[in-house]
Image (tube, rainbow, N blue to C red):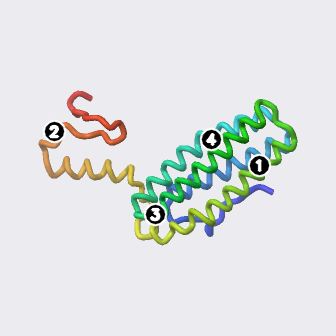
């Protein structure tokens, strides 16, 4: 039976909830590929999970830190643990997906997602609901810059720090 999103899984933040919904879709794709005995698709799903999971974990940790969630370090450690397990799993299976490996993979994903969301993400909800459900600290940096520009017409004359690139950026040169 396919996993389904339920409102009870919501952490109170649309960015994280949307990510979790998509992770459920990825797990469901893995199960469909498993039932079809399509190992090529299973490999593609695994790669998609690794890419999307990494981006999701970075977003989730950034938001957790921005809302002052006190267990952000444990959250990060949990994310690292999962990626270590997935890397080990990928090494073990190589390019061949036995029936046992395929079943283990989908079980691992199901168990991890449900346990992770319930035990590690839902406890963030009290910190999340203090903010807008659409809170995204990446947007906040953009909004802060716009507000400064509105208040100070000479703002564009001063070089700014691009925190994503960790370098000094002069807006006139871009």
Instruction: Specify the label residue 106 is tagged with.
Output: 1
Q: Quadrant of the N terminus?
A: bottom right
Q: At 53% from the left edge and 50% from the top edge, which residue is drawn? A: 57
| Circle 2/circle 1 CB separation < 8 Å | no
Packing grade of label 1 (10 A; few <14, some 14-19, many >=20) is: many
Q: Position of residue 165 (x, y in %)?
A: 35, 36
What residue is at 79 percent from the left and 45 percent from the top? 32
Toward the top, the furthest residue is 173
**Picture quadrant of residue 18:** bottom right
Tell us which disc is closer to us: 2 or 4: 4
The numbered mark, 3 or 1, whose residue comes first in the sequence reads: 1
**Residue located at (63% from left, 60% from top):** 116
In this view, 170 is above or below 19: above
Q: Which callout, 3 or 2, points at the residue further toward the start of the chain? A: 3
How far separated are the C-alphas under marks 3 and 1? 30 Å
Please tell me the numbered disc located at residue 133: 3
Task: Tell me how far mark 2 sits from mark 1, CA to CA.
Answer: 52 Å
Tag shown at residue 158: 2
The image quadrant where one finds the C terminus is: top left
The mark lying in front, picked from 3 and 1, is 1
- State if disc 1 and disc 4 touch (CB < 8 Å): no
Q: Residues within 10 Å of mark 4 (few under 14, many from 20)?
A: some
């Amino acid at each position: 039976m396919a996993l389904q999103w339920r409102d009870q899984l919501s952490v109170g933040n649309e960015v994280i909830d949307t990510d979790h919904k998509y992770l459920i879709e990825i797990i469901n794709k893995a199960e469909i590929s498993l039932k079809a005995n399509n190992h090529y698709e299973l490999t593609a799903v695994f790669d998609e999970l690794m890419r999307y999971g990494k981006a999701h974990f970075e977003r989730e940790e950034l938001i957790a830190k921005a809302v002052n969630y006190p267990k952000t370090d444990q959250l990060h450690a949990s994310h690292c643990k999962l990626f270590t397990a997935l890397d080990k799993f990928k090494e073990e299976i190589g390019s061949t997906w036995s029936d046992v490996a395929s079943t283990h993979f989908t079980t691992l994903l199901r168990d991890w997602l449900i346990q992770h969301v319930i035990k590690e993400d839902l406890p963030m909800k009290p910190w999340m609901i203090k903010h807008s459900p659409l809170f995204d600290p990446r947007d906040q940096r953009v909004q802060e810059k716009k507000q400064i520009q509105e208040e100070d017409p000479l703002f564009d004359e001063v070089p700014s720090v691009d925190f994503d690139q960790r370098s000094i950026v002069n807006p006139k040169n871009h």
